[in-house]
Image (cartoon, rainbow, N blue to C red):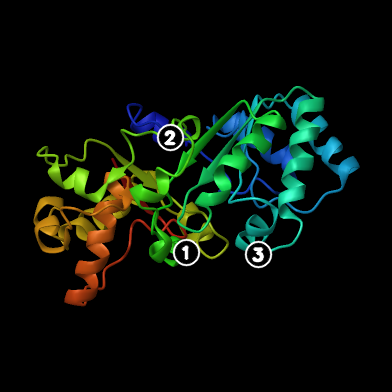
Amino acid sequence: MDELRDQQPEIRSGFSYGYSMEHPDLKGAIRTLRRLGGPTADFLQCDGMKMRNDTECIELMGMLHDEGIKRLNFTLYGLSDYHDRFAGRKGDFELILRMMRAAKAFRLPFSTGIPLTAENIHEVDRLVRVLQDHGSEKVFLTIPHEEGRGKLLRDVRLRMQGFLELSAETQKLLNATLYRTEGDWLRDAEPIHDTQRMILVALRADNMDAYESRDVMSILREIEALDETYYSSFPGFQELAKIYGDPVGEKLYRIRDLYYHYRTQYAQDHDIRVYDVTDERQSGSRRE
């Protein structure tokens, strides 16, 4: 990162440990993030954490408080039974509530995200009240993408009719400018312009030595080339929408996710096999 700042100071860079902040040396990891200027040095995503009892949750939050953590975030997929099934382990819902109670004891503010699907929508109003009662300063709703394991949620993507079953207050927790129906996106005459690109370098045990032996600019150029190859393998959004778009479609998407949905269909129809830069298990990119 020092090399990048020296050679390309206009490029912003950051370092993080991934979606779960569980770490064998979490205190050391937080200090490393802060030393490197990582965006998650003050904000921890507390998903996928190991099981802890009340005492262990208090110890965890006390350490986070002492290390200067300013905010936490949790993700809930539904009420207890549904959340535990979705997360794949019994007791995960209660673990998150224990961590919330412990965070409150140390006055650590936290927010909570709820991914909406056709399966959990009937639980969301009650879940929001549970989270607010437990001290969540902000609850926000999202619509899951179809990347990675998200493809398993394709058949339960939420439609507008399901969303309207929520109370008016709960509906306000979804960013209505970010998430719209497919039909609404297709009626928008504005073309998509990718104005920003984020390069993601995934450091893993099987590639660490290779990356360390190279200069940072060669790594960036390699991933930029992969990005260009990937996107040039597909028509643009407007052309794909003419082929696959449903002008009265009621499923809710972000525009980026709808574009990915169309690219997936096109790749299947044309047997396109190209390095997927959107797969965050490997180095790649994000366009916005």
Three-letter amino acid code at the position of disc 3 = Gly
Q: Is residue 166 left or right of residue 226?
A: right
| Left or right, 25 with reference to 260 | right
Q: So how many labels did they put on this image? A: 3
Amino acid tagged 2: Ser
Residue at position x 83%, y 49% from top? 52
Label annotation for residue 80: none
Query: Comparing marks 2 and 1, which lies closer to the viewer?
Result: 1
Q: From the image, state whether disc 3 or disc 2 is nearer to you.
A: 3
Residue 79: x %, y % from top left: 65, 50
- The picture places residue 25, in percent across and down from the top left corner, at 75, 45
Q: Residues within 10 Å of mark 2 (few under 14, many from 20)?
A: some
- Percent across and percent down for residue 190 are 11, 37
Element at label 2: loop
Question: What residue sits 49% from the left and 29% below the top?
Answer: 169
Q: Quick one: label 3 or label 2, which is nearer the N terminus?
A: 2
The residue that disc 3 covers is 88
Depth check, front residue: 178 or 42: 178
Pointer 1: residues within 10 angstroms few (<14), some, or many (20+)?
A: few
Q: Nearer the viewer, residue 113 or 126?
A: 126
Left or right placement of residue 250 versus residue 105 in this view? left
Say which quarter of the image contains residue 189: top left
Q: Is residue 253 left or right of residue 117?
A: left
Q: Nearer the viewer, residue 203 or 181?
A: 181
Secondary structure beneath dot 1 equals: helix
Residue visible at 28% across and 40% down? 288
| Residue hosting label 1 | 149
Look at label 1 and name its amino acid: Arg
Residue at 80% across / 33% down in the picture? 102
| Gap between marks 1 and 3 measured at Cα | 13 Å
Looking at the image, is mark 1 or mark 3 nearer the viewer? 3
- Identify the residue position indicated by label 2 in the image: 13
